[in-house]
Amino acid sequence: MLSFDNVSFAYGQHLVLKNISLQINKGEFLAIVGPNGSGKSNLSKLANGLIQPHLGKVLVDGVITQMPKSLREIRRLVGLIFQNPEDQFITTTVFDEVIFGLENIGVDPDKMKSIAEDALKKVEMLSYKGLEPHKLSGGQKQRVAIAAILAMKPKYIVFDESTAMLDPEGRQNIITLMQQLHTEGITIIHITHHMEEVLVATRVLVLKDGLIVADGTPASIFNNNIESNELEVPLALKLKQRLRSTGIKVPEQVMTLEGVVDYLWTSS
Ligand SMILES: Nc1ncnc2c1ncn2[C@@H]1O[C@H](COP(=O)(O)OP(=O)(O)OP(=O)(O)O)[C@@H](O)[C@H]1O
Ligand SMILES: [Mg+2]
């Protein structure tokens, strides 16, 4: 479990996270949304000890992130993927990029090659292993960054707007990969401004001005909190609400355009 206990974080006088208490259980697919500057990225950096709370504590599987000797293990357990993968590349080939992380955590050198190849295979990037990372497309770069994290066998992966710079197909590929990793048991935390992407989550958190202002299933968030949180409603839900207002009772649990179309087909 990832646990925030009364966590506050500030830059000088500017309090950017205000007494946050939050538990993220193993097996969740949590989406975090909220306006620019609401504190989402700071929350993700707190989750793996990249920054430390000024008040309160963050615990990863019961281990407090403030303990210097636990930091290496915490960073292995909680992988972070950023918006711009270039920011996290350090080596000159795709393969070395994955190996680099393994060297850092002291993996047996004999095992490194097969671990790195397995991770690259998982994201369908093995055939690019000799290439320079900066020569890849945005989506491919993101997949290499994910492979580098996967090689370290994380239990949690935080994607901080990792789909923001991708085209719709590239975005969908990353979402599909997140869903696959979630099915395989990795806890996913996905920070995004794309409301359609939130619908695949099991839970949604809305941050505003450093506070959690809503926490629930996608259906409950979009059905109840829309106006107060100024969220853009996904198209499928707008259509569902419009149909419901005209008396066509599309069920609450239908969350996708395909679902609405299926309902219309089968209900008439
Ligand atoms: N290095 C920094 N120095 C000073 N203030 C910072 C720094 N990093 C972030 N902040 C401030 O912290 C607040 C929260 O920032 P954060 O990056 O967590 O927001 P966010 O929700 O991730 O926003 P976005 O959607 O734009 O990514 C903002 O007001 C921001 O200006
Ligand atoms: Mg951010």
Image (spheres, rainbow, N blue to C red):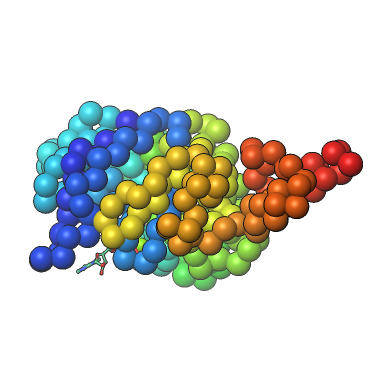
Farthest residue to the right: give it. 268
- Could you say where residue 16 lies in the image, as x and y percent from the top left? 22, 60
Quadrant assignment, res 64: top left
- Could you say where residue 66 lies in the image, as x and y percent from the top left? 13, 42
Q: Observer-nearest residue: 14 or 71?
A: 14
**Residue drawn at x 47%, y 70% as measured from the top left:** 134
Image check: 2 left or right of 112? left
Q: Is residue 99 visible?
A: no
Q: Is residue 157 above or below residue 27?
A: below
Farthest residue to the bottom: give it. 135
Total labels: the figure holds 0
Image check: 50 left or right of 232? left
Please identify the quadrant where the N terminus is shown: top left
Ligand 1 sits in quadrant: bottom left
**Residue drawn at x 35%, y 54% as measured from the top left:** 207
Q: Is residue 167 visible?
A: yes
Image check: 51 left or right of 31? left
**Residue drawn at x 32%, y 61% as measured from the top left:** 38
Image check: 245 left or right of 16? right
Q: Is residue 10 above or below residue 32?
A: below
- Could you say where residue 28 lies in the image, as x and y percent from the top left? 45, 35
Please identify the quadrant where the C terminus is shown: top right
Q: Observer-nearest residue: 143 or 66?
A: 66
**Residue drawn at x 39%, y 63% as measured from the top left:** 35
- Could you say where residue 216 lies in the image, as x and y percent from the top left? 45, 40
Q: Observer-nearest residue: 26 or 215?
A: 215
Q: Observer-nearest residue: 189 or 79?
A: 189
